[in-house]
Amino acid sequence: MTDMHAPEPRTSNRIRLLVTLGVAGLALAIAAWLWLGNAGQARECPVQAEAAASIDAAAVGELAALNGTGEGRGYASLAFKDAAGKALTIADFKGKALLVNFWASWCVPCREEMPALDALAGTYNSDDFMVLPINLDIGENGLGKAEQFLAENQFTHLPLYADNSFAAFDRLKQEAVAVGLPATLILDKNGCELAVLQGPAEWNTPDGEAVVKALLGLAG
């Protein structure tokens, strides 16, 4: 007797084949979307793997948490203001290698880190290098709080720059560069990222100085 249900295995195989092709097609579409998305993000800076590795090699001991990056992220357009309210960007400091430190007066680790940064700035700030602190106290009174903190502690080598809109740090979070304060960027003379530190560090130590000297060595 002929089995009237014989074609079922063939139908089942066909369904499995269609499902497999569908999954493969979806995976291909996702891969293409990711590739196109990344391709559409033009790098602001060239990749600088060797320079980042040089900074990374110098980051030991007290600076062991500093990570060399050099992946092409640039911050020339990163905006903030000076104490008088004048609009600035990192591009205004072109020609200087920068240690950009994001801090807030309510951030305890930030407050603890500031004396070391002030001392480091007093030793190394020059035509070729600068410690550039950017305060992130938000709101109308943010600038006043930051100014009061710097004045009370007599940090003579740390000028007041601020972004009370928090937009600058939001950019770092969006790019997965930093998630909390304090955070530090090591930038070359063109505002290109060479290294990132999430958290505080004892900058006014031989370990901190070694990182600055490595950066200055790259800057020539």
Image (spheres, rainbow, N blue to C red):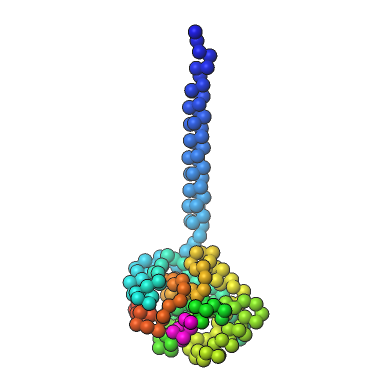
x then y, percent, for residue 26: 51, 42
Whether residue 34 sits left or right of residue 140 in the image: it is: left
Q: Quadrant of residue 65?
A: bottom left
| Image quarter of the C terminus | bottom left
Which residue appears farthest toward the front when viewing the image? Answer: 108
Res 192 seen here: no
55 or 103: which is nearer to us? 103
Q: Relative to residue 9, is residue 16 depicted above or below? A: below
Q: Secondary structure of the magenta portion, mostly?
A: helix
Q: Position of residue 27 (x, y in %)?
A: 49, 44
**Total labels drawn:** 0
Residue located 39% across and 69% down the image: 68
- Outermost residue to the right: 140
Residue 194, compared with residue 1, is above or below; it is below
Q: Residue at x 56, y 75 (%)?
A: 79
Magenta segment range?
112-118
Residue 26 part of the magenta segment: no
Picture residue at 44% right of the left edge, 71% below the top: 196
Where is residue 84 shown, x and y percent of the image? 61, 86
Give the residue displayed 53% in from the left and 14% down from the top.
4
Residue 142 in view here: yes
| Percent position of residue 73, x then y | 46, 67
Q: Quadrant of residue 167?
A: bottom right
